[in-house]
Amino acid sequence: MLSYFQAIVLGLLQGVTELFPVSSLGHSVILPQLLGWTDVVAAQSATESYFLALLVGLHVATALALVAFYRETWARIIRGVVTSIGTRRIETPDQRLGWLLIVATIPAGLAGLFLEHSLRVVFAKPLAAAGFLVLNGLILLCGEWVRRRSQGPVAPRFRQATAHGRRLDDLGFRLAGTVGVAQAFALLPGISRSGITMVAGLVRGLDHEDSARFSFLLATPIILAAGVYKLPDLLGHNGDGVRPQILVGSIAAGIAAYLSVRFLTRYFTARTLTPFAAYCLVVGLVCLVRFA
C-alpha cells in the first residue's frame, strides 16, 4: 500500500519532472525500482491499482499549479477565444494563441484517450523507461543542433538580435498541430512532454523562451483533462485506503510544479536544453546497465 513518504516523493518527482524536459513518467517508473518499492512498481503496470488514483491527484495538482502561474495569460486567452467565436474573426495575439493551443491540444488529447492506458501497461518498465530516457536526451540534442544550424554563422555582436527568431504571434495553425502531434509521444515513459514540444517549437523557428511558454501552456489542458477524465479512479475502489496519501502527494506536486515553472520561464530566457539532454543520456545509460 502507498505510504505518505512514497506519496510525497512521487508528488515532488511529478511536479518537477513534468515541466523539466526529463520525463515525469520515466522517472516515476525508474525511481521506485531503484528504491526497492516493489508494490509501487507492480501497481504501475497493473490494469487496475491505486497508482491510477495517485496519477489523478498528481496530474490535477500539476495542472492547477500551471493555471495559477499563468492565470493572467489564461484569463486573456479565454476572453479572446470567446470574443473571437462571437465575431468569427481572430484579431488579437491572445485570440490567436488561444486557437493555436486548441489546435495543438487535439492530437495529444486523442492519443491520450485511446493509447495512454495500453502504452502505460506495456512500457511502464524500468528498462524500457531507461531506453526512452536516452532517446529523449538525443531528441533534445538534435533540437538544439537544428536550431543552431538554422541560425547559421552569426557574429557575436549580432547573436542576441537573431536568437529570438519566429514569435508565437506568427505561429501557423499547421505548425501548432505539428507541436501537438509531437506532444503525443510523451505517452512513452522516458519521453518528456515539455522537452519534445519545445524541440518541435525550436525546429520550426521559435526561440527557447517562446517554445517553453507554449509548451507549458499547452501542457495545462492536457494534464488537467487527463486528471479529470480519470477522476473515477480516484473516487472509485482504486482510491480506497490511499486518498489521504494522494492528497498529501498532490499538494507536494502542486508546490513543486509552481516552483519549477517559475524557475524554467526565467531559465529559458537565456539558456538551452543541452544540460537536460546530458542528464537524460547519463541517467538513461546508467539505468540501462543497472536494469539490463
Image (cartoon, grey):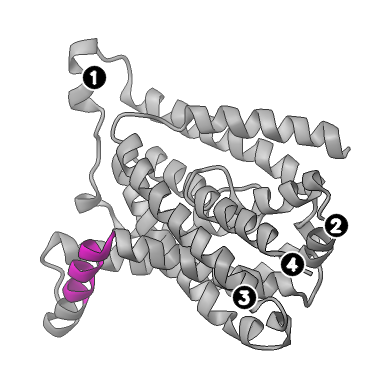
The answer to whether the residues at label 4 and label 3 have Cβ atoms under 8 Å apart is: no
Foreground disc of the pair 1, 2 = 2
In the rendered image, the vertical position of residue 186 relative to residue 199, given as above or below: below
Q: Nearer the viewer, residue 271 or 243?
A: 243
Residue at 15 percent of width and 59 percent of height? 93
Observer able to see residue 3: yes
State the separation of the CA atoms marked 4 and 1: 51 Å
Q: Quadrant of residue 268?
A: top left
**Residue topped by disc 3:** 244
Q: Residues within 10 Å of mark 2 (few under 14, many from 20)?
A: few
Q: Is residue 138 above or below residue 214?
A: above
Amino acid type of the residue tagged 1 in the rendering: Arg
Spatial distance from mark 4 to mark 3, Cα to Cα? 10 Å
Q: Residue at 63% of width from left, 81% of height from top?
A: 234
Give the SS element for disc 2: helix
Mark 1 Cα shell of 10 Å, populated few (<14), some (14-19), many (≥20): few
The residue under the point 25% across, 35% down is 165
Q: Which residue is mark 1?
A: 159
Give the residue type at disc 2: Thr
In the image, the segment drawn in magenta is 70-81
Identify which amino acid the numbered label 4 is placed on: Leu
The residue to which callout 2 is attached is 38
Q: Furthest residue to the right? A: 292
Q: Position of residue 84 (x, y in %)?
A: 16, 76
Identify the residue position indicated by label 4 in the image: 2
- Mark closer to the observer (3, 2): 3
Please provide percent x and percent y for residue 261.
Answer: 38, 49
Quarter placement of the N terminus: bottom right
